Image (cartoon, rainbow, N blue to C red):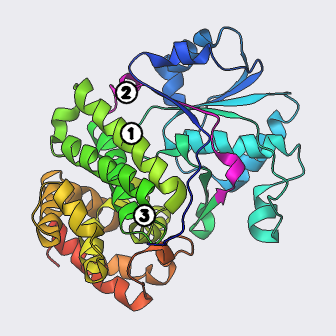
Amino acid sequence: MNSVWSFHHPTRITFGVGCVPFALEQVPYRRMLLVTTPGMHRRGTSDWLREACRGKVTASYEAVKPNPEMADLDDLALRYKEGNFDAVLALGGGSALDTGKILAVLLGAGGEFTLRGHFFAGDSMSKARPLPVIAIPTTAGTGSEVTPFATVWDIRNIKKFSLAHPTMFPAYALLDPALTHELPWNTTLATGLDAFTQACESVWNRNANPITLGFAYEAARLAWEALSRGEDIIGSIIYRTKLMEASLLAGLAISHTRTALCHSMSYPITARFGLSHGLACGFTLPAVLRYNSESDDGRLRELARRLGHASVDDLTSAIAELLRRLGVWALVQSAVGGSRQLWELESDMITPGRADNNLRPVETGALKAILDEAMRDLGAVE
């Protein structure tokens, strides 16, 4: 770890069952754009939120799709540029929150900034003035409600990009575990694995500092405790709360460290095979932990201790066993096949800004062995 470090976080966080209406009374905005998903519309959650805002929502976009596409987001900004909004209210999972954060950047730029111009022509975000964002997560996984970056996809070219700027921290994060209560098991599993992976990757991260490690250890402990219950999470507000707190704390950690090798490897897997993000980064956890153990400076041993294991090897075996018990192999196999199919993506798995955060330096040649180990850890036989 670096001996000199800093930590700053500007998001006002409110957490607890039933907290949203009360917290919304404290926000100063009067012309908000609501950004959410068709599912939130069908279940009436977006109508409930509009009512809680008491006329402060002046327009809505309720068609967010998973893995938001770059071209779609640029088009949306043009559609809503005359709305004269003073804030964006983002409700939903990681894709909805990321869409809201990106639209806040594009709308704040007044048409002078586009995603394609930024990623393909090098247009700078140095003068970015995003609209304030109020982020209300309805899944417990990405931690996007407290991070200064958002994911955008170019699916046609199998590319994932990250829009990042210090001005992109949401102004408010409102977390009510009850909003995750109706999530089906597969979504709960995938998003929970994302939170657990982010916590672990913030531990074995070159950018870690004492504050991020404190968040990451506790996030990993809470996520481990919840995921170990399996489908008992369904219907339990106690474990829903633990998982949402884990997601929040992991988000606070990665807001400064970012993620590392598991996430780096996951992006082309999601883009090529459509495997959900949490599963795509979570299934390699035991293999990547094993890989990093050779460079452990004590952090991995401490992670093992916090999760109730005597050694890093014991923790690696326990994570592999948990993934098998949770049925991750069947979900990965149905989307991907086996490790040979993943080998084809090897050259795309070293993502700058992710793989280079990893505790142990990563070379492309190591990835094939990690993928093979990951499949064996899940119980695959090829």
Residue type at the position of mark 1: Ala
Q: Which segment is the magenta one?
A: 163-184
Q: How many marks?
A: 3
Residue type at the position of mark 3: Phe
Using residue 353 as the reference point, say whether residue 180 is left or right of it.
Answer: left
Using residue 212 as the reference point, say whether residue 298 is left or right of it.
Answer: left
- The residue where tag 3 is placed is 273
Local packing at callout 1 (Cα closer than 10 Å; few below 14, some 14-19, many 20+) is many
Counting residues from the start of the chain, the first of labels 3 and 2 encountered is 2
Q: Tell me: residue 299, above or below residue 327.
A: below
Q: In this orientation, which residue lies closer to the viewer: 95 or 312?
A: 312
Q: Residue at x 12, y 67 (%)?
A: 317
- The residue where tag 1 is placed is 140
Q: Quadrant of the C terminus?
A: bottom left
Q: Residue at x 20, y 54 (%)?
A: 306
Percent across and percent down for residue 109 are 85, 46
- Residue 323 in view: no
Q: Secondary structure at mark 3?
A: helix
Report the Cα–Cα distance between label 3 and label 2: 31 Å
Q: Secondary structure at mark 1?
A: loop
Percent across and percent down for residue 313 are 14, 72
Quarter of the image for residue 314 reads bottom left
**Are dots 1 and 2 in contact, CB under 8 Å?**
yes
Q: Which mark is on residue 177?
A: 2
Q: Residue at x 41, y 45 (%)?
A: 249
Percent across and percent down for residue 245 are 36, 37
Q: Is residue 170 magenta?
A: yes
**Are dots 3 and 2 in contact, CB under 8 Å?**
no
Q: In this orientation, which residue lies closer to the viewer: 290 or 350?
A: 290
Residue type at the position of mark 2: Pro
Quarter of the image for residue 338 reads bottom left
